[in-house]
Image: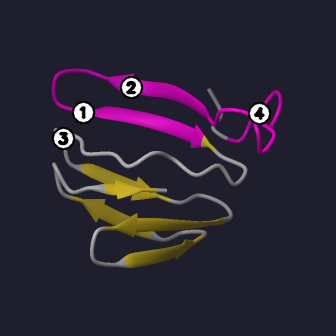
Amino acid sequence: MNIFEIEKLPGIEEEEIVDILKENEDVKIERIISTGQVSDWMVQEKREYVLLIQGNAVIEFNDKTVEMKSGDTLFIEKRERHRV
């Protein structure tokens, strides 16, 4: 799979595209393609490492907001409430 090969971008009113690239008991790697959707608040039981390949994103936490641009990375602790 080439992470840049995309059949169709989702519209703003459509769900973002989530493809699981690799998953086992130790790690889960996803490709998420979003065109401006806002997620619900999430509290997950695993730590997350975010790598923004292209575009911009805003990650909201209870006490801060992180603005990301292409190439930025972010580590999210487990059970840290956030949304994109």
> Relative to the observer, which residue lies in front, 82 or 74?
82
* Residue 17, quarter of picture: top right
Residue under label 4 = 6
Disc marking residue 27:
1
Q: Secondary structure at mark 3?
A: loop
Q: Residue at x 77, y 45 (%)?
A: 12
Q: Look at the image and give the residue range highlighted in magenta.
A: 4-32
Q: Secondary structure at mark 4?
A: loop
User: Does 54 appear above or below 29?
Assistant: below
Q: Residue at x 56, y 40 (%)?
A: 32
> Relative to the observer, which residue lies in front, 73 or 41?
41
Q: Amino acid at mark 2?
A: Lys
User: Does 79 appear above or below 60?
Assistant: above
Q: Earlier along the polypeptide chain: callout 2 or callout 4?
A: 4
Q: Amino acid at mark 1?
A: Val
Q: Are marks 2 and 4 in contact (CB under 8 Å)?
A: no
Q: Is residue 59 magenta?
A: no
Question: In this image, 78 relative to 35: left or right?
Answer: left
Q: Position of residue 14 (x, y in %)?
A: 73, 33
Residue under label 3 = 46
Tell me the quarter of the image containing the N terminus.
top right
State the separation of the CA atoms marked 3 and 4: 27 Å
Q: Are marks 1 and 2 in contact (CB under 8 Å)?
A: yes
Q: Earlier along the polypeptide chain: callout 1 or callout 2?
A: 2
Question: Of the residues tagged 3 and 4, which is closer to the observer?
Answer: 3
Category of crowding for the residue at label 4, using alpha-carbon neighbours closer than 10 angstroms: few (below 14), some (14–19), many (at least 20): few
Q: Earlier along the polypeptide chain: callout 1 or callout 4?
A: 4
Residue under label 2 = 22
